[in-house]
Image: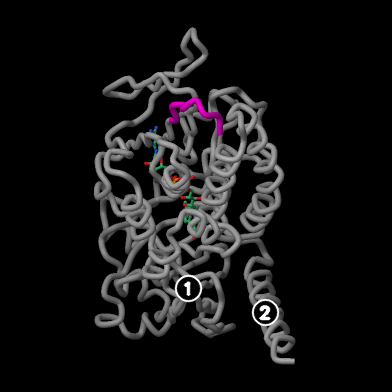
């Protein structure tokens, strides 16, 4: 990086933005992170994520956070089960020797936040606009303040980025899939049958236009998604998240005919429901470099969550961007180099996520999922055999 210090703003304290801030901090570069939420505890950060060795874990290693990560990683929750809608077990993968441990989002965010100097994150800063000054630098306009000038503004502000319009005209498009999120507390103590059903990891079931994914989180919590391919307006009309009992009834109605053992997941859910329409940017989304502005993570390439690449891609973006910024004598050249590599790197996973979203709830949806799991298990068994030889 040039010896002249530059002022860097990161918009968004999600996994991507915080990882970048930490990586630059380790390299002696100061950043300010602007976050819309009013504090780190304003809302629970959501479910569990599996961090891949070559991306999420790699970024944490570069950030010097492997030890902290190992304290919160759940290697024991890497299992996977598939059921038929009649409750029949189609596949159980209870292998825990994999290298994609689960981590709760809140624990990951806390790890990253605690690794940053105090005051790096400016809470309650919901960006509304980025404006260009006459000297070519940028000001950030918030609902309640204005900050600047910054030489480099990095949009890590997720799917509905307010930084993205400076470089791209694209908006994420509705995939046709809506997830209804629900949760079950204290599952081991209070609902042992459901604990067994899900096992150590996640379970899925799909039939007749409905599908269900349930993941074990830390602290004996289950987080589930009931998945529908429907117009968004239909989902909004059908599911009123302000009425938990209405939500349970609606879900039971939509999954009528499924085994009681599976429907118990809805019956025992707590009162926290959420509607999560799945949006994605076009595969291959890219832009022409604009000096002083760039994007990472979902802001650059939000994709459907199938494949579990979103967080991993965001954290790898952060590692790659930090590497370019720190390693290049001129940050103006570092940014386009990062962008060109990122566009090429992300196209593959984004294409796979789009393909998975397209086949979810199709006539071959469950067949494909089953075949993928079986292929994965066979590959692992073959690798184990060759390691023994
Ligand atoms: C239902 C669902 C399940 C998923 N499951 C998985 C999974 O299992 N594995 C996986 O890898 N990925 C999963 N994803 C995708 C994953 O959540 C994202 O890819 C990942 O969080 C992207 O990280 P990010 O830092 O780029 O953005 P985000 O995590 O979206 O963080 C953006 C941050 O910016 C803040 N922000 C937003 N707007 C503004 C603004 N205007 N001003 C200031 N701050 C702002 C937000 O509050 C947030 O803190 C899932 C997504 C969904 C919807």
Residue density around tag 1, few if under 14, some if 14–19, many if 20 or more, within 10 Å: many
Name the spot of residue 206 as percent of width and height, x first. Answer: 56, 69
Instruction: Please report the residue visible at 32 percent of the width from the left and 85 percent of the height from the top.
Output: 192
Q: Give 365 or 321, whichever is nearer the viewer.
A: 321
Label 1 residue SS: strand
Name the spot of residue 338 as percent of width and height, x first. Answer: 63, 39
The label shown at residue 244 is none
Q: In terms of sequence position, does the residue under pointer 1 or pointer 2 come before the other?
A: 1
Name the spot of residue 284 as percent of width and height, x first. Answer: 69, 41
Observer able to see residue 117 = yes
Check the picture and name the quadrant holding the N terminus.
top right
The label shown at residue 202 is 1
Depicted 4 relative to depicted 379: above or below: above
Instruction: Please report the residue visible at 61 percent of the width from the left and 23 percent of the height from the top.
Output: 290
Name, please, the residue furthest toward the top.
134
Q: What stretch is highlighted in magenta?
A: 1-8
Residue 4, magenta (yes or no): yes
The span from disc 1 to disc 2 (Cα, nearest Å) is 15 Å
Observer able to see residue 234 = no
Residue at the disc numbered 2: 374
Residue density around tag 2, few if under 14, some if 14–19, many if 20 or more, within 10 Å: some
Instruction: Please report the residue visible at 40 percent of the width from the left and 80 percent of the height from the top.
Output: 260
Depicted 84 relative to depicted 332: above or below: below
Label 2 residue SS: helix
């Amino acid at each position: 990086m040039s010896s002249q210090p530059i002022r860097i703003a990161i918009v968004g304290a999600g996994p991507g933005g915080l990882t970048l801030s930490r990586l630059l901090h380790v390299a002696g570069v100061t950043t300010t992170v602007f976050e819309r939420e009013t504090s780190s505890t304003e809302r629970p950060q959501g479910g569990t994520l599996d961090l891949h060795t070559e991306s999420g874990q790699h970024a944490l290693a570069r950030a010097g956070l492997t030890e902290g990560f190992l304290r919160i990683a759940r290697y024991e929750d890497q299992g996977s089960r598939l059921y038929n809608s009649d409750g029949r077990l189609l596949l159980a993968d209870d292998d825990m020797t994999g290298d994609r441990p689960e981590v709760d989002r809140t624990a990951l965010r806390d790890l990253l936040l605690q690794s940053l100097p105090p005051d790096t994150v400016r809470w309650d800063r919901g960006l509304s606009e980025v404006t260009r000054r006459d000297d070519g630098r940028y000001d950030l306009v918030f609902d309640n303040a204005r900050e600047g000038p910054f030489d480099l503004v990095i949009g890590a502000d997720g799917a509905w980025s307010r930084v993205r319009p400076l470089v791209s005209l694209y908006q994420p498009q509705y995939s046709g899939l809506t997830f209804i999120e629900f949760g079950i507390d204290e599952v081991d103590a209070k609902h042992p049958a459901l604990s067994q059903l899900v096992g150590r990891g996640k379970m899925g079931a799909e039939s007749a236009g409905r599908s269900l994914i349930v993941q074990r989180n830390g602290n004996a919590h289950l987080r589930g998604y009931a998945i529908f391919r429907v117009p968004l307006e239909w989902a909004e009309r059908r599911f009123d998240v302000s009425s938990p009992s209405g939500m349970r009834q609606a879900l039971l109605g939509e999954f009528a005919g499924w085994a009681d053992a599976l429907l118990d997941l809805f019956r025992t859910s707590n009162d926290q429901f959420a509607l999560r329409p799945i949006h994605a940017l076009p595969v291959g989304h890219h832009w022409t470099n604009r000096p002083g502005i760039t994007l990472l993570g979902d802001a650059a390439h939000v994709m459907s969550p199938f494949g579990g690449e979103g967080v991993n891609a965001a954290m790898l973006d952060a590692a790659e961007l930090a590497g370019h910024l720190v390693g290049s004598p001129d940050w103006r050249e570092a940014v386009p180099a990062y962008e060109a590599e990122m566009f090429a790197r992300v196209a593959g996973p984004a294409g796979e996520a789009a393909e998975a979203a397209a086949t979810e709830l199709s006539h071959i949806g469950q067949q494909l999922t089953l075949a993928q799991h079986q292929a994965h298990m066979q590959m692992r068994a073959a690798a184990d055999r060759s390691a023994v030889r």
